[in-house]
Amino acid sequence: MGRRLVPLTLDNLQDLPERCRACVFWELDPVSGQAAVKAGTPDLEKEAWISAVLLEWGSCGRVVYVDDAPVGFVMYAPPAYVPRATAFPTSPVSPDAIQLMTAFILPEFQGQGLGRVMVQTVAKDLLRRGFKAIEAFGDARWKEPACVLPADHLLAVGFKTVRPHPTYPRLRLELRTTLSWKEDVELALDRLLGAVQKEPALRPL
């Protein structure tokens, strides 16, 4: 089984799950996001966002391939590039951290260690670029797949709560700890990365 983790670009954007290619939940603020959906242009807005981040900051994601078939992805960026982050009651993300926006692995490819490899690849990339940690907004009342990852699952893979909230706590993972993860983290990672499976609803927070 050949595995590849490739930086996300406009060339492989089409390899993201269809529902994610045109999702601008994180890339636009709530008002602009709803306007893009109404206008039928979220896919163009997504492309424009990725293009801008690539030009100004660099790689903002990874696409995972197994035997040349795309099976998952992860997206991350400095909070300055993530307008939706400001809508969360526990913002802002710490200045020394990058924001984990969303991640996903196809259910049939979970349990194979891909989640661990993916997060470790992101950790190495960000450490090389001088960042110490990755932070995420979790959903403490998570009931069904959506763009915000479940807080319980983030905690299970080593994130720590840095700003509590009954609904949207902000959590942090020190990047150096991810490089020494063992096999026992795989199941929790698979649950986390398999959590975003349905069409995400764009809704104001």
Image (cartoon, grey):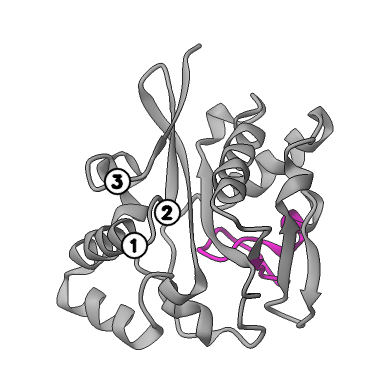
> How far from the left and from the top, in percent, is residue 140?
73, 71
Question: Residue 194, located in which quarter of the rendered image?
Answer: top right
Q: Residue at x 56, y 44 (%)?
A: 122
Q: In this view, does 26 lie above or below 196?
A: below
Q: Name the residue under label 2.
A: 60
Would you say the residues marked 3 and 1 are in contact, meaning their CB atoms lie under 8 Å apart? no
Q: Where residue 67 sits in the image (x, y, percent)?
A: 41, 16
Q: CA–CA distance between discs 2 and 1?
A: 7 Å
- Determine whether label 2 and label 1 are within 8 Å by CB: yes
The magenta region covers 136-154
Please name the residue shown 30% across and 53% down the image: 21
Separation of disc 3 and disc 2 at Cα? 8 Å
Disc 1 marks which residue?
53
Q: Callout 1 environment at 10 Å: few (<14), some (14 to 19), or many (20+)?
A: some
Q: Is mark 2 on a helix, strand or loop?
A: loop
User: Toward the viewer: 59 or 20?
Assistant: 59
Q: Does the magenta stretch include residue 146?
A: yes
